[in-house]
Structure formats: C-alpha cells, structure tokens
Image (cartoon, rainbow, N blue to C red):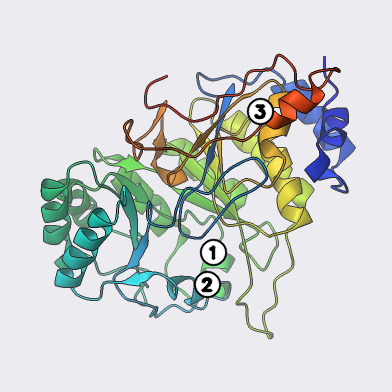
Amino acid sequence: MTDWLAAVDQVEPLDGVRLDAGLVGELQRRFSRPGGAAAGRIDFYTPTFKAYATSEIAGCGKSAWPAVSVTGGECKLQCDHCKARLLEPMIPARRPEDLWRVANEQVAAGARGMLLTGGSNHRDEVEYGPYYPVIRRIKDAFPAFRIAIHTALADLDHARRMEDSGIDAAMMDVIGSQDTITQVYHLRRGVDDFERTLEYLVSTRLKVVPHIVLGLHYGRFLGEWNALEMIRRHPPAALVLVVVMPFYAPAARPFVTPDSAQVGRFFMDARQALPGIPLLLGCARPPGRAKAEIDSYAVMAGLNGIAHPADGMVELAARLGREATVSPACCSMAVGNEVMALDADRPQAKAEIRPVIERESAGAGLAGIKVVAAASRHR
C-alpha cells in the first residue's frame, strides 16, 4: 500500500507543504478505499469567475460561468469577512430587464450558465421577487443554459417560486452558531432560520447545494459541526465546503487564517457523516501553502470535487489511486455522476498530466495509473 505522506513528497509542486502526519495516517486508514459510488473518482472544476490555470490544468476561458449580481456591489449586511467586496467584480443586473439582457449577451458569448446572486437586505434575504419571471423566460428561451442561485434566507413561498422559475441549483450558507450570525453577519436571525431555509429548499425539486464556510467566526471553528448536523437532518443533492478568506475584514475585527489540519479533520468528519452525498471543495480558501495543504487533505479525505485545485492535486490524486477528471463548470452544479453545466459537444479543459507520466515511466512513478484527460457527460 502506498504511504500517503511519501506520495506527497513525490509531487514536485507540493515541495515545502507541511501536513499533519497523524491526520494523514488517520485519513489513510479511513479513506484509502473511499465509500460511495462517486468517491473513487475526483472531479477538478475550473469555474470561470476568474482566470485560472496550473501546470496540470489548462484554463477554460472567461465566459463559461459568469457571476451576476442583482444588486451590483451593494449589500446591507456588510458582514465582517466580506464587506460586499465579493460582489464588486460581478456583472450587475439591477433590474429584471438587465438580467434578460445580460443572459442574452452571455449566451451569445458562449456561456454555459451563470451564478446568480446579490447583496442581502437586513434580514439576510436577496430580493429576487421581480426576477423570477425573467429567470423563467431565460430558461424557456435557452433550456441548456444553467442557472445556480445563491438563495440567502428564504421562506417556503420563495423556495417554490425558485423551483417554478426553472433554476437548476440553489445554494445557501448554513451557519450553526448564533454568535457567528450575530457578530460576523450583524444579523438578527437565529440558527433555526438557516435550518428552516434548508428544509424549505430540499422540499422542492431544486437541486440544493448548501455551503459551510469553515472558520467563519474570525478564523475559528465554532458552529461548523452543528451546521453539518443540520445538513444531515435535511440531506441535499451535494455539499460545498469553503474556507473563509478574510481579505476585506476590518482592522478592528481581524480574522486569523484557519488551521489547515483542523480543516482537514472537518473534511474527514463530513465525509463520514454524509457517506452518500457528494462533497465538494469550493473556490474560496486561503491562497499559497495553506491552499496546497487544504487541497491535499481534501483529496485524501475522499471529497468528490475541488474547484480551482492547487498545483499538484491531479498528480496527488493519481498517486493515491483516484481517477481524476477536469470539468469547466461551477462545482455547485455537480450533482450525482454528472456536471449539469457540461455540454458534450463543446471543448473541455484537459488535465495535462501525460508529460508527468512519461517523465516517470522509467521508474515507479505514475506509469500505469488511470487519469482521465477530460470529464465526459456520461460515465
């Protein structure tokens, strides 16, 4: 059996990465043969909210998955980790007619789908009401154009209106700590409001893909395991895990970078708690060495997908015996054994790992391992 720490040492881009030996050993004992129909394969997603490429994965263009905000750069909550700055680079669509125009422009430019979001009001609600008829119009005009929506908090009526509008995937942050809701989000809502929103969403036909933000309480873990229990009670189509990126935090309320090993332990617990649900590591996580460490733990813990993977992850997955594919899509659209955003007749990003295999074919290296160059629609 391959020693997983030794496998990491063989991946050149991971030189200098420091992993917790005890945690790696526990992950190997638990997940060297991951359970679940899709756990053996790992999908690497390259959503095009920003330009992306590594030595292993070619970029997939900037227009495939645009992010659109119905409030432009405005948000009433001004949460401590974001301060609405995440909305600023998105395409604004402040009126329903703007959304129709933007969708037509993006389809004409070759987009396969979009992320629809916006700033929240003081109750953590994005006021999508006037947009639902336009979303329905977009879906009727362009059935293959996929729409993932960030719901924020929503009642049952809005959940059903999202369903009727034809939205493909619904996303929300699940927060399990009242202190985090009050102090970080500046919100007068309770943990139960987040669980109710999740319950309402999963009662529809929507493909529901909640998120848990690890380290959301100023870089510390506080309500993450409670959020995981909430998700266990209302099983979604998939779960996306992200790690807080406090680039915009005010000086008076600083965040620390979450401990990578603690993140890895949460991956392990989440995989064990939700054995039949796809677990995906989303775009947001700290850069640099922390990202390489976090992504390594994600590969080892049996997560099913990673968006914008750190350099070396395709090779690491291959060395650990995991079939690797690359898909140019939003990871929140990954449900079951297919990525809904993919279109089989369009070019797809490729895992440029063949040169690595060829370099090492003379030795123990990667010769003989199975690496899929690009994701296919049907597996």
Residue 327 as seen in the image, left or right of residue 18: left
Q: Circle 1 sits in a helix, a strand or a loop, which is it?
A: helix
Q: Which residue appears at 58% of the width and 67% of the height?
A: 179
Residue 205 as seen in the image, left or right of residue 355: left
Indicate the amino acid at tag 1: Gln
Q: How crowded is mark 1: few (under 14 residues within 10 Å), some or many (20 or more)?
A: some
Q: Which residue appears at 44% of the width and 63% of the height?
A: 190
Check the picture and name the quadrant holding the N terminus: top right
Q: Earlier in the sequence, mark 3 or mark 1?
A: 1
Q: How crowded is mark 3: few (under 14 residues within 10 Å), some or many (20 or more)?
A: few
Residue 341 as seen in the image, left or right of residue 219: left
Q: Which residue appears at 21% of the width and 57% of the height?
A: 158
**Marks 3 and 2, how far apart at CA:** 50 Å
Q: Circle 2 sits in a helix, a strand or a loop, which is it?
A: helix
The residue at which mark 1 appears reads as 178
| Mark 3 or 1, closer to the camera | 3
The residue at which mark 2 appears reads as 182
Indicate the amino acid at tag 3: Arg
Quadrant of res 312: top right
Q: Which residue appears at 34% of the width and 45% of the height?
A: 199
Q: Position of residue 321 (x, y in %)?
A: 69, 20
The residue at which mark 3 appears reads as 354
Confirm or deny contact between disc 1 and disc 2 (CB under 8 A).
Answer: yes
| Mark 3 or 2, closer to the camera | 3
**Marks 1 and 2, how far apart at CA:** 6 Å
In the figure, 271 relative to 129: above or below?
above
Q: Where is residue 310 in the image (x, y as percent from the top left)?
A: 67, 47
In the figure, 227 relative to 187: above or below?
above
